[in-house]
Amino acid sequence: MRKLFGYVFIFVLGFLACAVILRTSGAGIYNGGATARGRETINQALRQPPRPRPTLVNSSAVADAAAKVEPAVVNIDIQGRQGGGGLRGLLPGGYRGIEGSGSGIILSGDGYVVTNNHVVAPIAERGGQIRITLANGKIFTNARIVGRDPRSDLAVLKIDGVNGLPAATLGDSEKLRVGDWAIAVGNPLGFNSSVTLGIVSALNRRNFRNDNEALDKVIQTDAAINPGNSGGALADISGQVVGINTAIISRTGTSIGIGFAIPINQARRIIDQLVKGGEVVRPYLGVRYSTVEEARERVRPGVVLPEDNEGAVILGTGGEPAVIPNSPADKAGMREFDVIRRIGNRTVNGIEVVKDEIQNHDVGDRVPLTVLRAGRTIELTVTLERMPRSFGVMPQEPQNDPELFELP
């Protein structure tokens, strides 16, 4: 009995101790509500101002950047004529009217403007009028084409007799990183001076075909680019132009978040040549080549190819010769199945290196080549010559999906 009484006493004492602990800690719950201390904590939380939602980018920074770029981006309208069949849309004299619009970037206060070649190409050969409208609404109708380059899809225009135009500040596209902010400024779908915001989605996109020409190393962005944006600015968050908007991929004809811009560093050299001489002079080697992996499936038995799969294999395609007759490569003694292992100071660890390195030189430069021929390493020197206009031009081909590549 005495033992049972002891158990009861310990149980009661423990129950009282738990009640005291719960009471003093403010953690007790009565009638489904909080204790006085608990209610005080909730009330303090409710009295606090809401925390600001995190922002992805400082809107003032975007506005400041756009304000720097907008004055230098212009609207370009073209009007011309071309021979036409049928009766619909004909102008007096049996011609069909041409109309189009795009964007451009003022390069200098004295009226030089860069745009896309495809913006002005429709009137370049048949003639027509170019009307340039500034962001402030001022209109110029005395613009002319200084030069254009279909391979890079760039053209330079000149507004004569002007000074003090708001010129863009050009940045350094080599410093771009995937994920950097991208601001597109242009005149999409007739809406003058429009600004859209996105990021740099990818860099150095290659072999993107625009008007049957292959554009190399373009910037991909998800900033909205639409028809009319062509030739407009792609700027960074500091308001410097880092690209020239040129094309989109779309099944609808409008932006789905995949746009492309020509890097400004790549455009500088083209622009400089167009301003100085009205055309672009490119050096060329005069060979057709493929990767080692592709060549293994096409070369005849007994041809020795490197086991490490590095280099560019000189190889003809579709009945075309591997080495163009009388080309710089031909004069230097290059042969089919040669493997270019080194060009200039660069190791050829991808076939794109060959084109990049050649285009980094000028006509007349002597470029050393390290070549693997029949398992032996030999050294050659090629003197670069001017690329013929027809070299590398792809034949017109019908596209399987004509809506896939839309020019804005």
Image (tube, helix red, strand yellow):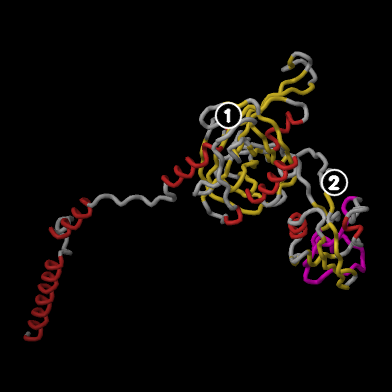
- Mark 2 Cα within 10 Å, few/some/many (few <14, many 20+)? some
Residue 92, how many percent across, how many down?
75, 13
Residue 162, how many percent across, how many down?
60, 31
Q: Please name the residue shown 75% across and 44% down the image.
A: 151
Q: Nearer the viewer, residue 218 or 275?
A: 275
Q: Please name the residue shown 93% across and 53% down the image.
A: 326
Left or right of 101 on screen, residue 66: left
The Cα atoms of the two marked residues, 1 and 2, are separated by 36 Å
> Taking 289 as reference, is 167 above or below it?
above
In primary-sequence order, the first of circles 1 and 2 is 1
Kindly identify the amino acid type of the residue bearing the numbered disc 1. Answer: Thr
Magenta segment, which residues?
Answer: 290-318
Kindly identify the amino acid type of the residue bearing the numbered disc 2. Answer: Pro
Q: Please name the residue shown 51% across and 44% down the image.
A: 197
In terms of image quadrants, where is residue 400? top right
Q: Can you tell which mark lies on residue 388?
A: 2
In terms of image quadrants, where is residue 22? bottom left
* Quarter in which the C terminus is drawn: top right
In terms of image quadrants, where is residue 165? top right
